[in-house]
Amino acid sequence: MSERPGALAGQVVLVTGAGRGIGAAIARGCAREGALVVVNYLSNQNAAEAVAQECQALGGDGWALPCDVGNSQAVHAMMERIEREAGRLDVVVNNALRPYRFDPEHRDRFWELQWAHYQSQLDGAVRSCFEVCQAALPLMRKRAKGSIINLTSDLVQRPSVPYHDYTTAKSALVGFSRNLAAELGPLGIRVNCVAPGLVLPTENARATREEVRELIASQTPLRRLATPEDVVGPVLFLASDWGRFVTGQVVVVDGGWVMG
């Protein structure tokens, strides 16, 4: 019996912020399904190159490509390279984000924040997606098919810790994604969100104390925290034809911490 072809065989997938953590896991997962994965990174070339090599070893292909996804000119140059060297773009996973510390005890309270904190997170979450999606659209329209997946957070549905600026930006990203789904659906392009809870190990969760991690795990129905690999399956579902009739949705990946 022959092995089934990968769900993303022959497709080109761009994963932003893919040099480590969740983005790297998603890149590897797409490669296992046969994709050529564009491993976008901002500054850590060695890490991104290592992920690209892993993608190649997993049966797909990998290509590390630097770009500041908040810079319009840089993003358009990246898309031109993808079109020139890969010839197509089928899936975009917007995973890149501004650095943020998930530290409940040392977070900024609302009265300590300035609008600049919100603006920084809005630029990191929404503007970067805006720039990437707008630049990717001509490539996707050529095929009248595509999938865009934006990484948000379960804090939008349940702000168990009020990380005001971060959660507000992710909430805006949900609204952005649903409007985009309504606009692009008639063009054959689907737009969805994946909303993880606290994911370990990731750089953002490094500051979360062990006692807090244990408390969250104990109150989670599946009794543990997510790993980067737990996020991969929902992304693959939405990226591939497995999710071909799903758009405008938020898939929460947190072991049941948020329900409904």
Image (spheres, helix red, strand yellow):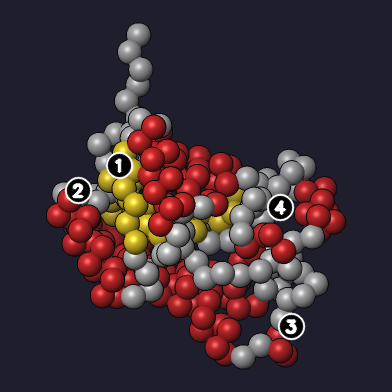
Question: Disc 3 versus disc 1: distance between alpha carbons?
Answer: 43 Å
Residue type marked 4: Trp
Residue closer to the observer: 72 or 256: 72
What residue sits right under mark 1 in the picture? 36
Q: Indicate the secondary structure of the residue bearing disc 2.
A: helix
Question: Disc 2 versus disc 3: distance between alpha carbons?
Answer: 46 Å
Residue 55 vs residue 207: left or right? left
Image marks 1 and 2: residues in contact by CB distance under 8 Å = yes
The residue under the point 77% across, 69% down is 104
Residue 163 picture location, percent across and down: 67, 73
The residue under the point 48% across, 48% down is 24
Residue 211 vs residue 191: left or right? right
Q: Is residue 206 above or below residue 88?
A: below
What residue sits right under mark 2 in the picture? 86
Where, by quadrant of the figure, is residue 157 drawn?
bottom right
The residue under the point 41% across, 65% down is 42
- Mark drawn on residue 212: none
Image marks 4 and 3: residues in contact by CB distance under 8 Å = no
Residue type marked 2: Ala
Sequence-first disc among 2 and 3: 2
Comparing marks 2 and 4, which lies closer to the viewer? 2
Q: Is residue 159 above or below residue 252?
A: below
The residue under the point 77% across, 42% down is 223
Tell me, yes or no, if residue 192 can be seen here: no
Where, by quadrant of the figure, is residue 178 drawn?
bottom left
Other-residue count near label 2 (Cα within 10 Å), few / some / many at <14 / 14–19 / ≥20: few
Q: Indicate the secondary structure of the residue bearing disc 3.
A: loop
Residue 241 picture location, percent across and down: 34, 38
What residue sits right under mark 4 in the picture? 257
Residue type marked 3: Arg
Q: Indicate the secondary structure of the residue bearing disc 1.
A: strand
